[in-house]
Amino acid sequence: MGILRRLAYAGLLLAACDRGAHGAPGAASASPSAEVVAAPSASAFVPVPIGPVPAFAALVRAERWADARAAIEAMPDAQRAQPEVRFVHARVDCELNDGRAALGELLGLENALPVLSTEIAAARARAQLQVG
């Protein structure tokens, strides 16, 4: 997957997490089949489809944390090991008060997702507070 595509996917997942924290509880919007982000070009921005939204993203937006964890853990290992999915999994673990599992998911993510290093550090701090 290209770097632009990975960053767009990470941004999408971050937005899914952010909506869950700040959106109306229980207000799950219908998830579109494909998201579009603007790709830089010399003359203008051109929409670049990034593919279907993962099923767990809608569950995170709706703050259905247990269901989101089940959906993530049901994914194949190769998909679940992607840094973007690990970041969301850590968020879900924190929401379910499982700081120890969240810390495991956050290991080394700053290197894999440098754009999200501030959010990763904040998530790690929340998880460490839960662990004690």
Image (cartoon, rainbow, N blue to C red):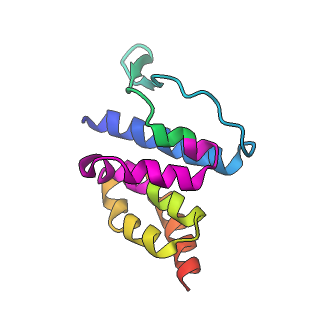
The answer to whether 80 is drawn above or below residue 19 in the figure is below
Q: Is residue 108 visible?
A: yes
Q: Residue at x 33, y 33 (%)?
A: 5
Q: Residue at x 39, y 24 (%)?
A: 40
The answer to whether 31 is drawn above or below residue 109 in the figure is above
Q: Residue at x 52, y 59 (%)?
A: 91
Extreme residue in the bottom direction: 132
- Magenta stretch containing residue 74, yes or no? yes
Secondary structure of the magenta portion, mostly?
helix
| Image x and y of residue 84, in percent | 39, 49
- Give the camera-side residue of 5 and 76: 76
Q: Is residue 22 left or right of residue 76?
A: right
Residue 112, quarter of picture? bottom left
| Image x and y of residue 34, in percent | 45, 23
- Give the camera-side residue of 14 and 96: 96
- Magenta stretch containing residue 120, yes or no? no
Q: Is residue 115 visible?
A: no
The answer to whether 98 is drawn above or below residue 35 in the figure is below
Extreme residue in the top direction: 43
- Give the camera-side residue of 68 and 47: 68
* The C terminus sits in image quarter: bottom right
* The N terminus sits in image quarter: top left
Q: Residue at x 61, y 47 (%)?
A: 18
Q: Is residue 99 left or right of residue 107?
A: right
The part of the chain drawn in magenta is 59-87
The answer to whether 44 is drawn above or below residue 108 in the figure is above
**Across the whole image, how many numbered discs are drawn on residues?**
0
- Give the camera-side residue of 27 and 113: 27
Residue 30, quarter of picture? top right
